[in-house]
Image (cartoon, coloured by chain):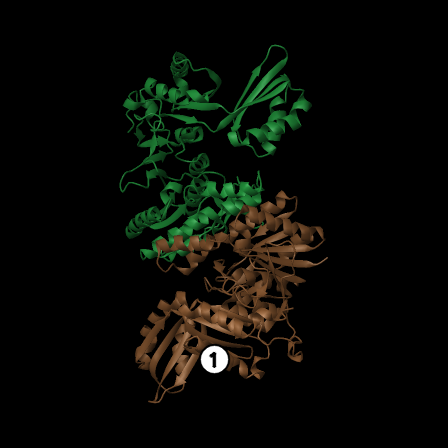
Chain colours: A green, B brown
């Protein structure tokens, strides 16, 4: 008997018939003698519908009230999933984040989990119940309902698996695993049978959209065995996320590049002509961080005239807020010449373990893009990825030519 | 400065524009220096939509899970109402039933309020907030979300007014007060400027649908000053529900009959041919009460052959459950000949203080119906009402002829 946490995303619970399918799958695991905790998202489309309602009343909705409204999406799904299970003759009980209780900080719309009380769930599991838990939500120390931000249901699943000491956390989605890149852009993309935690982290953070980055971080921190599976296939092993550095580097046959990730959700902010002296980065990014705006890439170039240009990327949704903030709090204070925003950008990354030791990778990437006339606006590198920012309109082209250049369609993905 | 509880029903918050209107009205009361607690229902149509979703998964949904799903309707509205207020520059905060906390028993889908914790609300009111509370819902001692049953938002409003010692509880609805009968059936129906608590109780319980009966009971018990108003009119005093026996009986000019109520929501259950001995009523109604099914009219006639027929009415939605229960637990045990159900009935009542002392009222009612060829199936009387059950198809006709016979269109309603 194992304890398994299964997380189902919005498309897997998009309507009553799909919820019934989820219940049948849970029933099969239950019949094998396993204890099952199910984490569900809102039915696909619901969260956007609820945000739309809120925005009809207030252009930038008060975050506490937005969470109050948006959290109902998952609350409906947990009730429906429990009903589908009960209808199959399985004991089931639904839980909101507050009922579990999943304690978070008070950062509405992007709260972080502080702790999970496992008492209620454990008691019910031991009494033979399937516990159906609302993803994406929690409660702060004052009893206010919070949400974890978009994609937070994955985080709920992994965090619950960690808190309960689950044997495996299965993330069911509308794809059957992690691919070398998005198959909608490159039809030749191949499924990876396994991928290291670090590679997955890069692929997820770069926008592969299979798993939310925070859930992968959580899984790594607590060594949760994580598997990505399709909720639309009866069988299939999906992609296992491993925590070994893998044997890839010791095997010349193995490809160095695991995949190509991309992201259209970021916007570029440039602060031009700031005096080149210590403390610039902090003075610019401090107010941004205080406003709880996440920053991804950060680049600073030293200029020739004693001034420098500072560029970073934020989520497109936060571009106007960021620009307003910088103009208000930073520009005058720092005597910056100009502040520019650009949301017509995209980020493309190649990801793979051991990339650093292969200097040819970067130059191959840059040459491939140059041959197609694609200009590179920013570059950022890490141990296992090279990311570039390009004009948004070249995104699909860039992904396709890079996928081909690194021969990912022929890769020994298993 | 007064403390006012305002309750808005589903049609008053049916869409963002109407919610904005609610916020503007609240703002006016706030500007007068009052403290305001707002109780809202789900947007009209939402509760039925949610019940429909639940029924797609389970024909008779598990009550705990149904409450989990249905309670989201009000949760969305409180968030939206708070946003509309904040957008007007008014400090506002929404509360679910659990957050207040409104403690109920564990009878899911028809829970009763046990107590209301006023601490959070009082603290926020004193800090200048408008508190927006979800109607219709509470939480049981184990933290499960409960609902009070249909129309329960009125009860939430009155119960909150009682707990907070509010100066007035205003119930906003889509009509501008209590009428002599439903104006959709009788266009000549007139608004009553005031009505006694007891009359209102009968009018509400007989299905006038302006106020839910439990809320009126609550108001009477705690002497809450209750006023019914239209949310679609800027001005208007609505109808005040008074707790005096009123001066009506001392004034020959006053009409005896206040109004005519009717109800299409009940079904008739008859247990035929049960032995005529003590304990019958308990043996039949005991299991019904245990199953938490509300019974309205109860009639027992002594028969000639040592057996008797026992008839009562339940909500139409519970007819099949009641029949199954009686066949299972009562019929064999009591040796009853037959159990019959009929949901094609309607109830019509005439309501008025001092009716008992005017013997001519009942005969006038029966004669009026007889003249139209309407057969009376059941009769039930109280101090202030006479109710009859008739064939559903004659309902509108019966209400119209009774309204005319008792000259309600000409009544001195003020």
Residue at figure coordinates x 48%, y 55% from the top left: B71
Total numbered badges shown on the rendered structure: 1
Residue placed most toward the observer, B12 or A365: B12
Residue placed most toward the observer, A71 or B211: B211
**Quadrant (top left, top right, bottom left, bottom right) of the N terminus of chain B:** bottom right
Residue at figure coordinates x 53%, y 72% from the top left: B404
Tell whether B379 sits left or right of B192: left
In the rendered image, residue A19, in percent from the top left (x then y), is placed at 35, 48
Mark 1 surroundings: few (<14), some (14-19) or many (≥20) residues within 10 A: few
**Quadrant (top left, top right, bottom left, bottom right) of the C terminus of chain B:** bottom right
In the rendered image, residue B144, in percent from the top left (x then y), is placed at 48, 58
Tell whether A203 sits left or right of B155: left
Q: Is residue A153 above or below residue A128?
A: above
Quadrant hosting residue B280:
bottom left
Label 1, secondary structure: give it: helix
The answer to whether residue B240 shows anywhere in this view is yes
In the rendered image, residue A406, in percent from the top left (x then y), is placed at 34, 19
Tell whether B290 sits left or right of B249: left
In the rendered image, residue A106, in percent from the top left (x then y), is placed at 57, 43
Q: Is residue B19 above or below residue B358?
A: above
Q: State the residue position of label 1.
A: B367
Q: Chain of mark 1?
A: B
The answer to whether residue A139 shows anywhere in this view is no
């Amino acid at each position: 008997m194992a304890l398994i946490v299964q997380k189902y995303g919005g498309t897997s619970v998009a309507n009553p018939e799909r919820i019934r399918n989820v219940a049948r799958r849970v029933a099969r695991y239950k019949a094998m003698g396993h204890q099952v905790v199910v984490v569900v998202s809102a039915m696909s489309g619901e969260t956007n519908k609820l945000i739309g309602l809120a925005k009809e009343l207030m252009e930038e909705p008060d975050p506490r009230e937005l969470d109050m409204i948006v959290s109902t999406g998952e609350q409906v799904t947990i009730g429906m999933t429990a009903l589908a299970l009960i209808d199959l003759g399985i004991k089931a009980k639904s839980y909101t984040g507050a009922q579990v209780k999943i304690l978070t900080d008070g950062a509405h719309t992007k709260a972080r989990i502080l702790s999970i009380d496992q008492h209620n769930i454990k008691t019910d599991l031991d009494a033979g119940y399937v516990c159906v838990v609302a993803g994406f939500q929690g409660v702060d120390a004052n009893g206010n309902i919070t949400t974890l931000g978009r994609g937070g249901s994955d985080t709920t699943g992994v965090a619950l698996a960690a808190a309960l000491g689950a044997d495996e956390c299965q993330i069911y989605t509308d794809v059957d695993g992690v691919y070398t890149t998005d198959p909608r852009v490159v039809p030749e993309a191949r499924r990876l049978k396994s991928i290291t935690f670090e590679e997955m982290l890069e692929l997820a953070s770069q926008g592969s959209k299979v798993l939310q980055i925070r859930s992968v971080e959580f899984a790594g921190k607590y060594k949760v065995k994580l598997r990505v599976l399709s909720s639309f296939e009866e069988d299939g092993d999906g992609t296992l996320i491993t925590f070994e550095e893998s044997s890839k580097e010791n095997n010349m046959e193995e490809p160095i590049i695991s995949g190509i990730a991309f992201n259209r959700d970021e916007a570029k902010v440039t602060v031009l002509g700031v005096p080149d002296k210590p403390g610039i980065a902090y003075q610019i990014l401090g107010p941004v961080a205080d406003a709880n705006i996440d920053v991804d890439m950060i680049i600073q170039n030293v200029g020739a005239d004693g001034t420098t240009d500072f560029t970073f990327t934020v989520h497109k949704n936060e571009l106007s807020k960021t620009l307003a903030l910088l103009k208000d709090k930073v520009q005058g204070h720092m005597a910056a010449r100009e502040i520019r925003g650009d949301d017509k950008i995209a980020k493309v990354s190649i990801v793979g373990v051991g990339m650093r030791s292969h200097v040819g990778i970067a130059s191959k990437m840059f040459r491939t893009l140059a041959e197609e006339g694609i200009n590179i606006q920013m570059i950022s590198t890490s141990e296992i990825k090279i990311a570039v920012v390009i004009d948004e309109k070249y995104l699909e082209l860039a992904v396709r030519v890079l996928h081909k250049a690194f021969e990912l369609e022929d890769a020994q993905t298993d």
